[in-house]
Image (cartoon, rainbow, N blue to C red):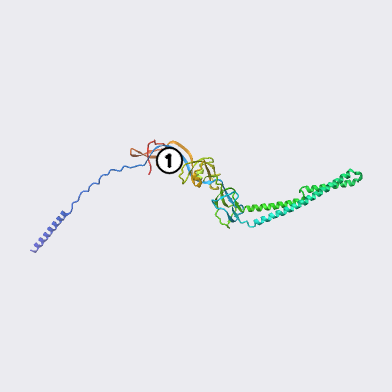
Amino acid sequence: MIKRRIAAILMMTALALSVAGLSGCLLMPTEEDELPPPLKEPVKPRFDVYTVGRSTLLEERKSTGRYVYSNTTDLAFAPNGGTLQYLYVMPGEKVAEGQVLAALMTDDLDGQLNRAQRELQRVMIENQRDRVRCENEIKRAERDIARQEERYLTMDAHREMYTSEEIREAKLRLDEMREDIVKTYGEYGPGGFTMAESQLRIEAAQQTIDRLRVRLAETVIVSPIDGEVVYMREMNVGEWVAPNTTMYQVADTSYMDVETTDATFIRYIELGSRVSVVPVGSADKARYPSTVVSMPRRPDDSNDQPQPKAHILPDEFPASAANQGYVEVIITLSVLEDVITIPRSSVQSFDGRTYVMLLRDGLREEVDVVVGMETATEAEITLGLVEGDLVILRG
């Protein structure tokens, strides 16, 4: 009896569980099929193109130059140097020819010069005194000769009154007096050795003065021209200045040209080459025809030579030249007129091929080309393109 009840309970429990599971399935939502994504029209590619045409192609080399005064003089204390005492002018100041720009301490040179000048005055006074004395002696001797000559002639004319010995002695005395006067006027000039010695003392005193004046002149820097100070070495009063140290540069401001120190550019030019200059940092972008007027002695030798410099003289100076600014210097090496050109950046090379990308019927197409002359921005195409082709520019 009990077993039958347990079996009935188990059967009812199983039936209830099966009904609950069936109702749960009926309550869950049904899955829907995924919709396909909406169709979009493909984006057409856009290209930057260059229309092939003809133009003039210039092969040029460019460099940077600056306006400089072409007549510039370096000034230094030479040859001994010394202690700096005065700096009279500063850069940018106008100076006149002969104006003193700077000076060294002179120690006792001024005093030595004053003493030498007094010594010269003393020996010149002595010389004058000796000269007067000698001239008086000469005049006295000439008078004695005249009297002796007159005596001899008288004796010779009246031989009957004098013995031959007296006449011979008179003649001998006259000859001796003449020899003495010849010596007085001879090798050493009036006054003989005394005057020659006095003259040597004058010359020695003058040489001492000249030497001291040269040494004093070496203690100052003097401007050789009218111009402007364009450089001054930075030094303080009291510092030692080495011999031949450039202290100033003075420029003749009435003469100016363009200077370039670009050794690579200088190799493309020569004396007399025609070039152009273009102002830098100015609204004026015109090309000013110019001529190369000076070249370094050996522009290719950079081992033992100073920095190479070439100077260029414009036919007409731009207005900006007054500011002594910079310019671009251009030399044209060759000119090709009426040739097909394209931007150089659009030429491509790969695996031995040289080609460009063309746009034809909306599609890209590689076309092999032959490149001629090239510049920094353009390339001549001698084969492969015709006018009107659309070259795709590389981004």
Of residues 254 and 51, the one nearer the viewer is 254
| Image point (90%, 45%), residue name | 164
- Counting from the top left corner in percent of width and height, residue 208 is at 68, 53
The image quadrant where one finds the C terminus is: top left
Of residues 10 and 223, the one nearer the viewer is 223
* Farthest residue, direction right: 160
* Farthest residue, direction left: 1
Q: Quadrant of residue 255?
A: top right
Q: Is residue 349 visible?
A: no
Q: Which residue is mark 1?
A: 378
Of residues 320 and 73, the one nearer the viewer is 320
Number of numbered discs overlaid on the protein picture: 1
| Image point (45%, 37%), residue name | 336
- Counting from the top left corner in percent of width and height, residue 4 is at 8, 62
Q: Is residue 22 left or right of residue 35?
A: left
Q: Is residue 44 left or right of residue 28?
A: right
Using the image, determine if residue 334 lies above or below residue 118: above
Q: Quadrant of residue 55?
A: top left
| Image point (43%, 39%), residue name | 379
Q: Is residue 150 visible?
A: yes
Q: Quadrant of residue 7?
A: bottom left
Q: Is residue 245 left or right of residue 34?
A: right
Mark 1 surroundings within 10 Å by alpha-carbon count, few (fewer than 14), some (14 through 19), many (20 or more): some
The image quadrant where one finds the N terminus is: bottom left
- Counting from the top left corner in percent of width and height, residue 69 is at 54, 46
* Element marked by disc 1: strand
Residue type, mark 1 in image: Glu
- Counting from the top left corner in percent of width and height, residue 162 is at 91, 46
